[in-house]
Amino acid sequence: MNLGQGLIIGHWVTLRRFLLTFWRDIKDGKGLHRRGGGTQILDFWSGRMPRGQEPTVRQDSTTEGLFTVEYPDERLPVYERFRVLPMLVYDTEDGNVRCTSCNICAKVCPPQCIWMTQAKGPKGNVVPLPEEFFIDMDVCMNCGMCSEYCPFDAIKMDHNFELSNYERHQTHIFDLQDLLVSSEFYAQTHPEAWETAEQITERGKVSKKKDQRLQKALAASKPAAPASSQPAASKA
Amino acid sequence: MATSTTPAQPSVSRPEWTTIIDPVLQKELEQHVLVTSWDQLLGMVDTVYNWGRRSSLWPLGFGLACCAIEMICTASSRFDIARFGAEVFRGSPRQADVMIVSGTVTKTMMPMIARLYDQMPEPKYVISMGACATGGGPFKEGYNVVSGIDKYLPVDVYVPGCPPTPQALLNGLIMLQKKIDGEKLDVTLPVLGHVRKGNTSWYSENVERDIPVPVLGPDLIDLRLVEVSAERTAQGLIEAREETLAKPAIIAAPKTDAAEAALEAEEAAAAVAKGGKPPKKAKRAVAQPTLVWLGEEGLNALAGRLDAEFGAGTATIIQAGLLIPAEKLVAVAYYLRDRNPIKYDYLASLQSVHYEDCIEVNYQLDSTLDPGKVITLRARTSAVECEGELPTLSSVWRGADFQEREVYDMMGVKFAGHPELKRILMWDGFAYWPLRKDYLEPYYEGPTKVFDSRVEEGFGRHFRSEELNPHGTNMKIPKDYKDWDKLSSGDDTKGKTLMPTGVDISELDTDQFIVSMGPQHPSTHGVFRMNLRVDGETIVGLKPVMGYMHRNHEKIGERNTYLMNFPFTDRLDYLTSMGNNFGYALAVEQLMGDEAKVPERAEYIRVIMAELTRVASHMWSIGFLLNDLGAFFTPALYAIEERELILDLFEWAAGSRMMCNYYRFGGVAFDLPKGWIERCRGVVNDRLDGKIDELDRYLTANEIVLDRCRGVGVITREEAINYSTAGPVLRASGVNYDIRRAAPYGIYDRFNFDVITAEHGDVYDRYLVRLREMRESVKILKQAVADIPDGPILPGKKSYQIKVPAGEAYSRVENPKGELGYYVVSDGSPTAYRYHVRSPSFINLTALERMCLGYTVADVVGILGSLDIVLGEVDR
């Protein structure tokens, strides 16, 4: 009779899986190592990498099974297109904020979580810089539309997902200072996009165009317009 | 802790010590001795106690929306929440420590959440997971969404993201652990007279942390604020505000070609008479109900036949649809189903549009015997609120049942003869008909996005939607509402009107009783509820109660520009975002015509993504079917392993595991990254087959699976068609109907694959169809990854300004759950005039009662699992 056989087979399947994990560890010599490249299995006291430099664990089609990635001591690799919240890029060389507050990001933002006002010179003339820029992260849906359609490569998607906190009314509205990051930081997190030919030529064109517009605005309104010099980098 | 933090105090005498110690000695002591005061001793006890509590946080097994899927993934093998001692997801709030509010909190669900929270014992914690739970998220503007769970519950940790990845949730959990580490208890040591005040709110005697359960009246009403609400409502502040706002445009219903031409000529003449130029003719899309349809000649012949049968004037062709007068509708429907040469036995979709002069309900019909001959019927009724009435067609096609109720709920159109015309997504007593164009939501800002306040001078600063509404919350109540004192927390406004009548089973000599199953139940796949009437263990009546996840997708979709709507479609069936994108792209591309011609490479990418989605979704479905059969979580863990690798591919190409937002009109958003296709080939060619074989080997012949699934939840071929079921449910009953073959879209006609069918229509066959469909998907994938050409991925330059000609379109794709349809009416403006989603999960549920009658409660769980519903799509 095969009554109850299914139950035994089921248990055998899980037991085999359980034993196999040990066998694989021994076979690969991984018993005393973390998959992500840590030195020892008991690295509670030493051998931990500082925050942000934890080893990443690759799992692809050749990985046998699917093992646990021990967050926070190990991480999954972050793909370049991975998107959490938007960030605004300023150029490291000259400190210029790339955003010209052209409003396109706000125009494509599906849940309408972007607020911005354009900077104004003392005579009321328009300066191609954001005076204020807010993103409400309780409304943002991480869709990446803003960065996809930004013509100035100014708004990009950040990779930082470790944003948990205890309070929302003060901290969840990101203003200009929270959003700004250096182009150096962006080049680090998005190396592929940074190196593409289109982005390099685009950068050249954009900086030229922006410079002209800025000069024009400055000429129209002495003394200089606000917010152009040395923005404090919150994440760089 | 070993060293003291209070140096150099003049007096070192302590009240609890009788001897005075030399200050030098005291210092010395504090350097080497761990505990020198009662507080320090208690602190050590706190440490141990907190360590114990924080390492065994038992979450409530409670998921709301998309975030819940990521929460489940957090518990799966790759992220393994067990490392934090939090893997014990409890089904009962009475055993849980932490409530992870994972997803959009709707008004309909809020009373349930409050109740669950009140039932949790102290100490209890709340993690607000995702943007929706935290502050309303992208659905904040919706009329049925609570903008932030913190309006009702005290929240301990917020986890931002949409959705937060499993790692982000773990980060939130670590934050909660840190918070617990800092907790101190109130301690009284009676013998020594030592009293220490802690910092925990829950550990004192007179604390009352329960919250009053909010009430579903004309809107969701917080009983703590009922007086203020009543006062502000009586002042008519809402109405006053609305008068200052721009209202949505409302257009006239489409007319016959002749009438349209006459009107245009008249307008042109009037303009010329005034001395101006004749107005430019607006661009119109080609009139066709959907891409694959009966065709103009066939439609003319059909109209002729109907006129001959029921008298002249029965069928008027309007924009490639047949307008039928309401009084002849039922007769025509029977004719089309039974006597017409092409037997229209399948009601694909039913929806309504609010026009200036009428509310139009239209019906898309297809034939399962001769598929791909879609026609549209139109029926019109009064546009005045609550006056419209049409005959029900649920006697002809049972599948019309829930869809007509939805039209009633959203538009206020009554259906004469409908067996149970109750609200379906909102609750009876809700004061408005939300999809009518004249209904403005509490947070309404303008008829279309972009809202002026964001980009122009506007407010010039950030504001929350709460600031717009006089109530300060997402609430709108008619000025003349009076019954404030009748509101009671005990009311079950949503479920009480839907009590199953049931039939007697005479041989069982037991009393019948009613079980309300859900909306918080581990096996209802989300916030779905069933009112069951059981006779002993046997089901004699079942009424689905839904709407607990109704987050106003369609209303928001009518304010979004066409492009903006893509990320919202991701959140319909959040397990298959790529497939949802596909359907929506097709609908708008149908209107755009040749302007959005998809390049070859993009077509391949679309198919690859859609089929990967199908495999991932079916794996999930099979795993959780086993969950429902009682094999808790282990089979699901095995089944969703491979899904993770597919999600990696999505994340790599599109940027997000679940909310891909990857398709664009005429192509896809980005080209595949370097190395992507190689890894995809690796997954497709080397792994998926093996994994499907593994599932097959473990499950298909497993005696428990056979025992629980065979002959359970049977639905016959005729019923399956009549109930408008779709996808694997329909095919498991022996109907060879797969949109990829019946009405091919994209480049599916180029691939070699079979449509899988089975005969018995039971739970087992539905499982088997899904399993075999995965093999066919892998077959398609193998062909696609081998043949994918190089080339552009979009027809032109990427632009955010999409021009869509006026007209209407209905697109259909074979999503893993069944036929997913998008009905779009465009008036030539940047936003859709009407946007409707034909949701397979929703319509498949129509047949649930039929499937369950006569089986036991335990079987209901399995049957529901075999339908594979996703609540984001059921309730939209």
Image (cartoon, coloured by chain):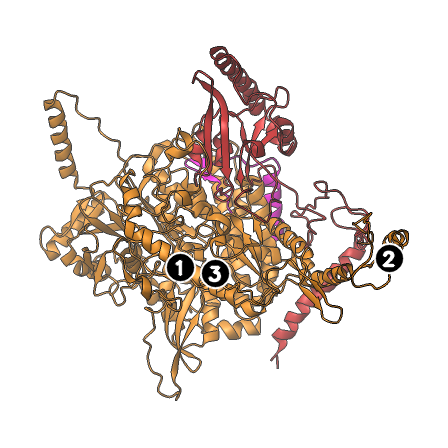
Residue indicated by mark 3: B526
Q: Given the image, on which type of amino acid does mark 1 rest? A: Thr
Return the residue nearer the eye: B187 or A185.
Answer: B187
Left or right relative to A201: residue B142: left
In the image, the chain rendered in orange is B
Q: Chain of mark 3?
A: B
Q: Earlier in the sequence, mark 2 or mark 1?
A: 2
Image coordinates for residue B470, horizontal then vertical, percent: 36, 46
Q: Secondary structure at mark 1?
A: loop
Return the residue nearer the eye: A160 or B453.
Answer: B453
Image coordinates for residue B694, horizontal then vertical, percent: 61, 61
Per the model, the C-alpha gap separating discs 2 and 1 is 58 Å
Q: Earlier in the sequence, mark 2 or mark 3?
A: 2
In the drawing, what numbered circle is on residue B33? 2
Residue at figure coordinates x 29%, y 37% from the top left:
B246
A67 up-or-down from A84: above or below: below
Q: Earlier in the sequence, mark 3 or mark 1?
A: 1
The answer as to whether the residues below labels 2 and 1 share one chain is yes
In the image, the chain rendered in red is A
Return the residue nearer the eye: B337 or B178.
Answer: B178
Q: Given the image, on which type of amino acid does mark 2 rest? A: Val
Magenta segment range?
B659-688
Residue indicated by mark 1: B108
Return the residue nearer the eye: B533 or A127.
Answer: A127
Q: Quadrant of the N terminus of chain B?
A: bottom right
Query: Circle 1: is it few (<14), some (14-19), or many (20+) Cα within 10 Å?
Result: many
Image coordinates for residue B663, horizontal then vertical, percent: 46, 40
Residue at figure coordinates x 53%, y 49% from the top left:
B130
Q: Given the image, on which type of amino acid does mark 3 rest? A: Gly
Image coordinates for residue A230, horizontal then vertical, percent: 61, 23
Per the model, the C-alpha gap separating discs 2 and 3 is 54 Å
